[in-house]
Image (cartoon, helix red, strand yellow):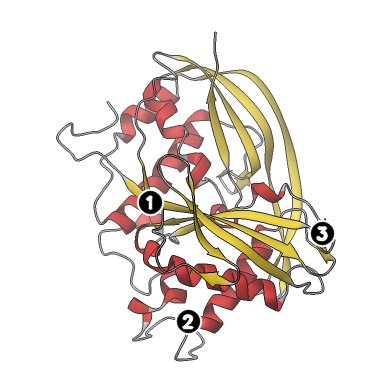
Amino acid sequence: MLLADPDHPAPALRVATVEFELRAEQEAVFPRYAGATLRGAIGGALRERACITGAPTCEGCPQYAVCAYGRLWESPPEPPADLPKRFADAPRPWVLDPVQYGNRTRYLPGDRLAFRVHVFGPGLDFVPWLIQAVATAGTRGLGRGRATFRLVRASSVDRQGEAMLLYANDTLSASTPIGVRTLTPARSRALPEAGRVTLHLETPLQLVSNGRTAEHVDPQAFTARLLDRFDRMHLSFEDRPSGLDHQHLRRVAGLARVVHADLVPERFERYSQRASRRVPMEGLLGRVTFDHVVPDLYGLWRLAETLHVGKQATFGFGKVRAQAQED
């Protein structure tokens, strides 16, 4: 059973996926993993547009509850009282998904830069602010040398996967609804019984154990981190516990066995604007196939494609796509 209590309401995390397409107006150079670069540029533009107090931090700000920058980009000054201590602080209500630009490092004028941002729960009210911030960030400049980009379009994806245009011709649509869907770790018909599932690590996955980055994907550790992340987000954004049966899901994760692994360690650096220094990063890329994966576990693992998992998930790291294998 996915739920510890069968009478508990099914967990459902509201999310909107916003797709951005920008066009380079100057030659631009990005680091290989530009999630942190995009995050810093968008956050700076959002603060410039939304902050009306000019305070150095959001802590104690009387406008926090209605401020797009505070609600989207900063942890709440006072996390929910019932947030378990192991969670440390409340999660951000968005995840950057940079896979669409394919880790490309150089853009020429006219080239297309595309990426996604998944926005959750309370962040949904501030999607128009986010779109305007991306447009401003492009105008101010991105990447090395601050090359300028123009936001060509922004769209959201509805439950049927259809694109809904939210921004075009330098204009934000006031009438197009934002496509909102729900994420739930439901059993999938793609895996009717215990079978094989491949995890595709599409951006570096960093799972830390005893202070060290794991050199392989342990199914129990991966499941535990994903469970904690979903629980944090569900409690913070939907105001109630997810009710997922941690004991059951961790137990069945222990039954999964590696059939094949093709993983490579990836080491790189990102520049931290707050710390004004380069920060070393590492993680795993590639794929690993497990046998004896039950449908409940597969349903949970599929969430990692949108939520991401591991360190720096908000920046775009830890995007993992789960795929059931045919016999």
- Where is residue 93? Give x, y as percent: 43, 60
Closer to viewer: mark 1 or mark 2: 1
Label 2 to label 3, Cα distance in Å? 29 Å
Let me know if residue 72 appears in the view.
yes
- Where is residue 225? Give x, y as percent: 46, 42
Residue 318 sits in which quadrant?
Answer: top right
- Where is residue 122? Give x, y as percent: 35, 63
Residue 224 sits in which quadrant?
Answer: top left
Find residue 107 and name its label. Answer: 3
Find residue 180 and name its label. Answer: 1
Find residue 50 and name its label. Answer: 2
Is residue 4 or residue 107 the one in the foreground? 107
Residue at (50% x, 36% y) in the render: 222
Amino acid identity at mark 2: Ala
Q: Quadrant of the C terminus?
A: top right
Dot 2 or dot 3, earlier in sequence: 2
Amino acid identity at mark 1: Val
Amino acid identity at mark 3: Tyr
Label 1 to label 2, Cα distance in Å? 23 Å
Element marked by disc 1? loop
Task: Check the image and report above or below for 306 versus 249.
Answer: below
User: Do the residues bearing badges 1 and 2 touch, measured as CB atoms within 8 Å?
Assistant: no
